[in-house]
Image (cartoon, grey):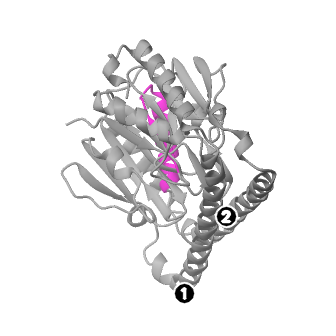
Amino acid sequence: MVEQSSHYFVRGNTAHGAHFLHKSAFDGLNKIYVLTGPQGTGKSTVIRSLANSLLDKGQHVQCFHSPLRPDELDGIILTEWKVGIIDGRVCEGISENEAGEIDFIHFGEALDNGLISPEHSRAIEDLKGKLVSAYSKAYETFLTALRIHDEWEKYYIESMDFVKADRIAQDLIQELYAGHESNTPTVGRHLFFGAATPKGAFDFIQSLTDQLQRRIFIKGRPGSGKSTLLKKLAAAAEKKGIEVQVFHCGFDPNSLDMLIFPKLRTAIFDSTAPHEYFPDRDGDEILDMYGLTMAPGTDEAYAAEIAAIKERYSANMTKATSFLAEAEAIDSQIKAYYVAATNFTIVEELQLRLQSELNERIGLDAAFII
């Protein structure tokens, strides 16, 4: 049974700050609807309602989740019709020059500013300042954790056989791509399968790979060449004209954590904490980079040093997560002010207008209208 929905993130709270992949994820669409307006004016609720209605109609929907609240949606894509809908407050990198037609739907029209008193306005501005501060502290602490992670990697990089690592990459390129090459190079589509959230790391690996025939679980240690392997595979796939989805690390977006080759029905991914999984069906296999490329006894030789690093790393990751939780709480307070001042009759009218346009564009019958 083919899944009717796919789930991703296209923005992340990372060690390099807020990171956005909308430009790649929404590339090639015929139409994008950008919903503008502050939090609390019904954008995410409308996006979720539209997604559910489309799924009920048998349409395939790509769902892009919020890293602040993963149960909420930042946007969706109607796959078959190449139409996207996204919250303009949280997207970056989309422009008319890169996409097809773009329409802005202003949910701020539903906001009755007369219901926001001067006292409330001052409170909102104060909260916005605190929100920026909470995010900044989260990003700074994630960066500290990344630098500690770099210390961790050094112990393994010094023990690594790079010739063997390159041979593994070249063998995989030959095995995976032989017979599937094209004379036309491709460009990979860049996404996140997971994100750092106020409740910790969250990912969609299982749902994204569930329908694939082959899954390669990369095991190893920090610095054992997992991301480098994936970068080599991605570059070779693009050069050889093989469709590839490139998934960046939600902690360090300069690293890669997974590749999916839709036409090869294959995924290869970093299967270590915080997204550690194990083979559980036919077609699953392990690629152990530690066993294949590292000098034996590396773990044992540096056990004490690595244990101390891991403790510092975990403490900073926990601290950064607490700052994200603080940001979510502040954002909820801001949102409450806007919810109280929003006329949801107007929100419903905006939703009906959007649904009507979608019906006309994709040819669904009037029953799509809720």
Q: Is residue 228 magenta?
A: yes
Q: Is label 1 in a helix, a strand or a loop?
A: helix
Which residue has dot 2 on it? 138
Closer-to-camera residue (325/180) = 325
User: Height in image: 22 above or below 83?
Assistant: below
Closer-to-camera residue (30/258) = 30
Which residue has dot 1 on it? 304
Q: How many other residues sit within 10 Å of disc 2, few (<14), some (14-19) or many (≥20)?
A: many
User: Height in image: 348 above or below 356?
Assistant: below
For badge 2, the amino acid type reads: Ala
Closer-to-camera residue (9/219) = 9
N-terminal of the pair, mark 2 or mark 1, is 2
User: Height in image: 251 above or below 245?
Assistant: below
- Taking the spot 66% from the left edge, 42% from the top edge, the residue there is 38
Which segment is the magenta one?
226-248
Q: Is residue 130 left or right of residue 56?
A: right
The residue mark sitting in front, 2 or 1, is: 2
User: Height in image: 219 above or below 177?
Assistant: below
* Residue 104 image position (x, y, % from top left): 63, 24
Q: Is residue 106 visible?
A: yes
* Residue 119 image position (x, y, % from top left): 79, 56
Q: Is residue 294 magenta?
A: no
Which label sits on residue 205?
A: none
Quadrant of res 321: bottom right
Q: Is residue 262 visible?
A: no
